[in-house]
């Protein structure tokens, strides 16, 4: 996997935005993307980066931002979540598939 710094991505621990998402989703840890920054709450950067599936999931969201544009993607994501719920949001489905694929590829390498 390419180094996140080479991709010009940031990982922000103890993010206010991720903390809000954590409260809304009622979960112990969250990673979320806003543009080219992966926001974390309840998880340290080192732990997050060791989970290849989770990193791939968030990198998929980075790509979705890139393809749609920042504000357009935020709008589309929120609209999709409103219509179909978080779990069935097509952007989350795509990201989960990316995470599953990355996990399978990693297992094949080891």
Image (cartoon, rainbow, N blue to C red):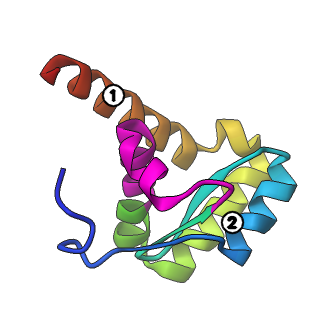
Identified at 69% across, 37% down, the residue is 87
Question: Residue 5, how many percent across, how many down?
Answer: 24, 74
Q: Secondary structure at mark 1?
A: helix
Q: Which residue is mark 2?
A: 18
Q: Quadrant of residue 36?
A: bottom left
Residue tagged 1: 103
Residue 4 lies left or right of residue 26; in this view the side is: left
On the image, the x and y values in percent for residue 72 come to: 54, 76
Assign the C terminus to one quadrant of the image.
top left
74 sits left or right of 51 in the view: right
Magenta stretch contains residue 27: no
| Residue shown at the point (48%, 36%) measured from the top left | 96
Q: Quadrant of residue 3?
A: bottom left
- Position in image of residue 38 (x %, y %): 49, 67
Lateral position of residue 26 relative to residue 11, left or right? right
Q: Position of residue 12 (x, y in %)?
A: 52, 74
Residue 43 in magenta stretch? yes
Report the residue at 70% width, 63% height from top: 78
Mark 1 surroundings within 10 Å by alpha-carbon count, few (fewer than 14), some (14 through 19), many (20 or more): some
Q: Of helix, strand and loop, which one carries label 2?
A: helix
| Chief SS of the magenta region | helix
Residues shaded magenta: 41-61
**Between 7 and 63, which is closer to the camera in this rendering?**
7
Task: Sort mark 2 into few (<14), some (14-19) or many (20+) by Cα contacts within 10 Å.
Answer: many
């Amino acid at each position: 996997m390419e180094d996140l710094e080479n991709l010009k991505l940031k990982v922000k621990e103890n993010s206010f935005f991720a903390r809000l998402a954590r409260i809304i989703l009622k979960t112990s840890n969250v990673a979320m993307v806003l543009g080219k920054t992966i926001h974390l709450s309840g998880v340290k950067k080192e732990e997050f980066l060791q989970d290849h599936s989770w990193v791939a999931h968030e990198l998929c969201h980075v790509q979705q931002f890139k393809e749609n544009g920042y504000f357009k993607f935020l709008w589309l994501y929120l609209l999709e979540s409103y219509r179909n719920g978080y779990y069935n949001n097509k952007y989350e489905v795509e990201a989960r598939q990316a995470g599953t694929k990355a996990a399978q590829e990693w297992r094949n390498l080891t």
